[in-house]
Image (cartoon, helix red, strand yellow):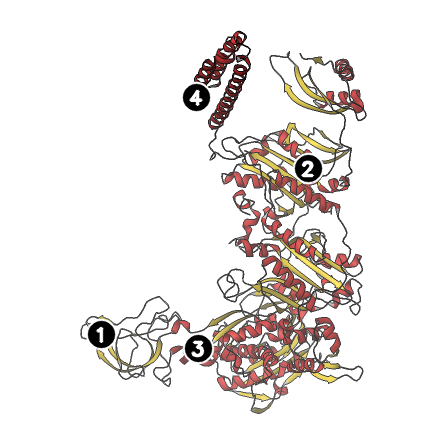
Amino acid sequence: MNVTLNWLKNYIDFEFSADELADRLTMLGVEVESVKQLGVALEGIVVGKVNSISPHPNADKLVLCQVDIGEQDALQIVCGAPNVSERMSVPVATIGTELSSGITIKQAKLRGEESYGMLCSERELGISEDAAGLMELSSDTSVGTPLAEALGLDDTVFELEITPNRPDCLSLIGVAREIRAETGNELKLPEVNIRENDTDIREVTSVTIDAPDLCPRYAARVIRGVKIGESPAWLKQRLESVGIGVINNIVDVTNFVLMEYGQPLHAFDYHKLGENRIVVRRAAEGEQITTLDEEERELTSDMLVIADANKPVALAGVMGGYDSEITDETCDVLLESANFQPASIRATGKKLGMHTEASYRFERGVDPEAVIPALNRAAQLIVELAGGTVCEGIIDVYPGKSEPIQIQLRSDRVNFILGTALEATEIEQILYRLGFGMEASQLEDSSYQVTVPSFRSDITREIDLIEEVARVYGYDNIPTTLPKGDIPVPVSDISVEVRKHIKQFLLGAGMMESVNYSFSHPNCFDKVRLAADNPLRDALKLRNPLSPEMSILRTTLMPSLLDNAQHNHNHQINNIALFEMSTVFVKGEEPWRIAGILAGEIGGGVYGDPYKNPDFFDIKGIVERVLEVCCLTDYAFKKTEEPTFHPGRNAAVLLGDRRIGILGEVHPEVLEIYELPYKAYLFELDLEALANAADFSKRFEPIPIYPSVQRDLAIVVDKEMQSDTPIDIIYSTGGELVDSVRLFDVYVGDQVSEGKKSLAYTITYHSATETLTDKDVNNLHDKVVKRLNQELGAELRL
Amino acid sequence: MKAELEAIQATALEALKDVKTTDVLESLRIEYFGRRGKLTDVMKGMGQLSKEERPIIGKLANEVRASLTEAFEATKTALESQQQEQQLHAEAVDITLPGRKPAYGKAHPVMQTLERIEAIFTQMGFQVVTGPEVETEHYNFDALNTPSDHPARDLHDTFYLTDGHLLRTHTSPVQIRVMENQKPPVRIIVPGKAYRVDYDVSHTPMFHQVEGLLVDRHVTFSELKGVLVSFARQMFGDQTQMRFRPHFFPFTEPSAEADISCTVCRGKGCRSCGHTGWIEILGAGAVDPEVFRAVNYNPEEVTGFAFGMGVERIANLQFRIPDIRTFYENDLRFLQQF
């Protein structure tokens, strides 16, 4: 909502500059979002009077004007406007003025005649699009006055952000009340005097409220014999300065009073109301109304309408009806000032997609006691500006009248909550200035019985009063201290530990952390070729997604990482090593996952550290280390049929019998879909499973004191044999004496026969209790070789 | 014979001066000390000397031998170190060739910021707690004193799921979940993702928040200020000023928004802070008694405060990224920068 500095001064005195006021209001909780000086673009433009006009000797369409701008000599100005005439008051752009179009006025010779300025049209001043002729000013404005001042544009507009709990601040008087709290100055409310005619309003209309639950109050006045016309300049200027469009004198008055009191009003053409009366009722299901914006609207039975004897004539608290609106022919007006139940207005506005100045206020809550002052104020202004007379009396149906709210306030509770040491009298003073009724409580010392004014519907509890005290006292004046309470004993969380360790490792391993939206496109499962019955396809769907790309919640991180690879490849970045750690959404749960991708080139890409293409064993190695980081050793890998991956280059990650993740080379068809011209390797692990199994309770193991002995062993086996099959046999043969087995070479080629391969291992023998002799080791090693031969048909390769 | 010895010594020392390699040195050594060497020959002639002469000449011969041996050794040492020097010289590398840098990844900038925030509050005794992102109306709104007809709901443009759930619009529901399961004192922070229907240069539909909650028998608004000022100083630097403005949140009363002095102009006023000198960084307030009632805490027995901040916003005070959607493109050229 916008208010202006000068307008506010009509309701309260204060000495603040615009910037000071903005700061004070902001620190009171009425946040000033912007401060705009009006009329800045009119600098250098003054009011001038055309004293005389003479023809231009060298041009038919131009004339020479002698213009008085309040200086000693009149200025000669060459002008070509069709409407220029003697004794006309006009805006004069003096030498050096920069117009809003960017043109700077200079002393010039126009067709041989000197010109010392420029007479301006509204368009040239940036005031309107009117370029038909010079802007004509009222003849009583004195020459030399800056135009901004003459037009009432020497004002400052404040754009306010009013929080939803403070509808009382959605008006000039409301903001003035805040300034009262700050300064202690009294409000200057408009004085209203209405001369009524002899016709009793009850003879010409009636108001019936059929839905008192939705309409606590409805008041009306009738004004007869008005003349619809343009509003005077002061009124138009006020409304325009706060961004409200100007329509006609009646509607402009209702908007002006809306801004003044925060009370939405509506003016009906009295003769367009069936039986000239008002019925406030719920709409019939399917009933229709054409609203002021000429939209036809179908209503539902939960919506409140203002009806005449036959049909709805307004959508209560939201917008008037088209058929009963004020037109140039209107002569009698029924003026409505009413109060509606917030939730109902909010629901109606939402359902119909309508947001108006009226509904904005009603859905937040309007002071029911503003109904009459606002109605009278508007009636008075209408008579002043549009003529006519006001019928005697007011119809005021007020079924929702309620007693003011009373709250018990304990001064020491204020200090207890805020951490302050305020005196009871300070508290009393602050609340009094805010308009609260303060009475010392009979029940308790330094307590008050506080009466809440009708415009503060947000105040219902002691804590609300405490906030009022705090904000007027000033949050910045409240001490700044550190908490004194006990620090609760922290609970350690293994899954947090696991995530931290894994992340640390992956960063150290050169992978960049990626963070993606939780949203995904439903086609992402097809893109990664998930099997039709894969439970991961069972994703939660958004009812109101931003786009199809963001319409489901992801169940796996892998498509996101492929998207990232695609994005980077499209931008010529090809050293892709990314991981993401996030929750996913599966079966009503949100388990943590860790996933990573390697694609393109890894390595430094420099002399001595060339790029290399990652392969299956790079991704496998990363996963193995991740498991080791969690202190897990009981893991294994097993080929799967997952269609996302190359059928011969993927593995499920097993922890005991449990499958906790997958890794592998991405299937070429998936690569093609993601437009990746090189291989990509993915893994995804269930972090919950890792956390459940992880064991960080490390214990010391004695460092070996006896020397170990190494023996290399190269065997020729069937090509299909897995490399860990011989390892199992070596361990089971050597028992505790085999410290480790390391595969260091795999060979297929001319040196071995077709269908065979050579595997070379280094076996480390070691005993914890003695130094192994050559003889011991040789015996053991021979046994190993023998068993490998017996069980696997492995031949020693010599 | 004496003259002979002295001549040998002189010529040997002279010859040593010209020796340039260990090979030459070796042949020179053989020339003097070998079986048929010059010195050996002279020594062989000792037998023919008289009794009187023998000890004198013998002594001299030993002296010559010792001095020559020493001279040969010295020459050898000198030659060896010279040779090593030459070898090292030959082994010199072009030190401007690139180093072999071990790979090194970087945490996502939003996560880096989140971790810093967590660390600061953890030091102040706050426990990190998380909760679900798919929430119910109850936890996201109702229990936080935001009933369905409340205009404050308009402030949160909510994503709904087809099954009737919603994506939490803030991490505040976790407050409720924690208080339902724990007796005071409570001192937690809740980092996590939150969602709102918003997508422009300063909004992403998913963002990160850190929510904080402290509840105890007597927690004051002044302590809320203390904790947040302490946070701001650690996060943004010792010189940071902080101000608290009254605001409105349904789940706190009194409520506040907190601003810090602009990190660009240090409060003088510039474009970044809209010439106000202040930048809004978080919302906070004393826990509303209705919230306590929703979790069966007695608001007469406990008080507390809560605060919430947007991680992207705080990250961007440092990084100044013109379009925050860039955070979630995961462009490596972007990620490398942080």
Q: Is tag 2's residue or tag 3's residue first in the polypeptide sequence?
A: 3
- Residue B244's spot in the image, x, y percent? 62, 68
User: Of tags 4 and 1, which is closer to the observer?
Assistant: 4
Residue sitting nearer the eye, A388 or A189: A189
Do tags 2 and 3 sit on the same chain? yes
Mark 1 lies on a secondary structure that is: strand
Identify the chain of the residue marked 2, using the numbered disc in the image.
A
Residue A626 circle label: 2
Taking the image as drawn, is residue A211 in sight? no
Q: Earlier in the sequence, mark 1 or mark 2?
A: 1
Residue A545 pos. (x, y %): 61, 51
Per the image, the residue denoted by label 3 is A154
The amino acid beneath tag 1 is Glu
Q: Quadrant of residue A258?
A: bottom right
Q: Amino acid at mark 2?
A: Val
- Tell me the element at label 3: loop
The picture quadrant where one finds residue A712 is top right
The CA span between labels 1 and 2 is 87 Å
State the residue in front, A531 or A20. A20
Amino acid type, callout 4: Lys
In screen coordinates, is A559 left or right of A423? left
The reply, left or right, for residue A3 in relation to residue B301 is: left
